[in-house]
Image (cartoon, rainbow, N blue to C red):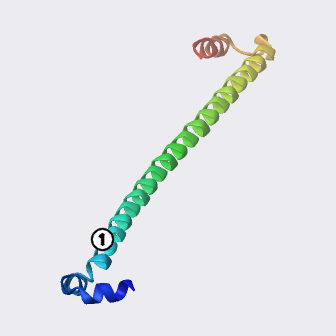
Amino acid sequence: SHTSILEADLDLKFILTCYDGDLFQGYAKIVDIFDQELLTMINDAVRDNRIIFIFYIVLLLVVFYRGMFRQVMHRCQEESRRAREFVARVPAYLLSEPENLAIKSYFADH
């Protein structure tokens, strides 16, 4: 059998007994290398995920505030239009001349 041949050869028996742990040491080093690569890949993935999340949050805030700004500007314009309509409906003969000029100049500037 093959084991009897291996045991009979003294040189081969010496090699097997002296370097018996090399296989397991080599396997342990390969596992360590894979673990390091896996840790590097996980850290890269976490970093990329954080960058994407930050970009998403910033984009969400920009869109949200842009929408709010447009809504506020639309409401300001609407209130300005309503105020002008109100002033246009106020009879001019009820106001004194300086009040009439002050109101007209205010809305002419704004």
At x 73%, y 20%, the residue is: 81
- Residues 57 and 53: in front is 53
Q: Is residue 13 left or right of residue 106?
A: left
At x 51%, y 49%, the residue is: 53
Q: Is residue 55 left or right of residue 13?
A: right
x, y (%) of residue 84?
72, 17
Q: Is residue 71 above or below residue 92?
A: below
Q: Is residue 9 above or below residue 78?
A: below
Residue hosting label 1:
29
Q: Quadrant of residue 7?
A: bottom left
Category of crowding for the residue at label 1, using alpha-carbon neighbours closer than 10 angstroms: few (below 14), some (14–19), many (at least 20): few
x, y (%) of residue 87?
74, 18
- Residues 72 and 15: in front is 15
**Count of labels in the image:** 1
Q: Is residue 1 above or below residue 36?
A: below
Q: Quadrant of the N terminus?
A: bottom left
Q: Quadrant of residue 38?
A: bottom left
Q: Quadrant of residue 36?
A: bottom left
Q: Quadrant of the C terminus?
A: top right
Q: Amino acid at mark 1?
A: Lys
- Residues 54 and 61: in front is 54
x, y (%) of residue 47?
42, 53
Q: Secondary structure at mark 1?
A: helix
Q: Is residue 47 above or below residue 60?
A: below
x, y (%) of residue 45?
45, 54
Q: Is residue 77 left or right of residue 23?
A: right
- Residues 19 and 47: in front is 19
At x 65%, y 12%, the residue is: 104
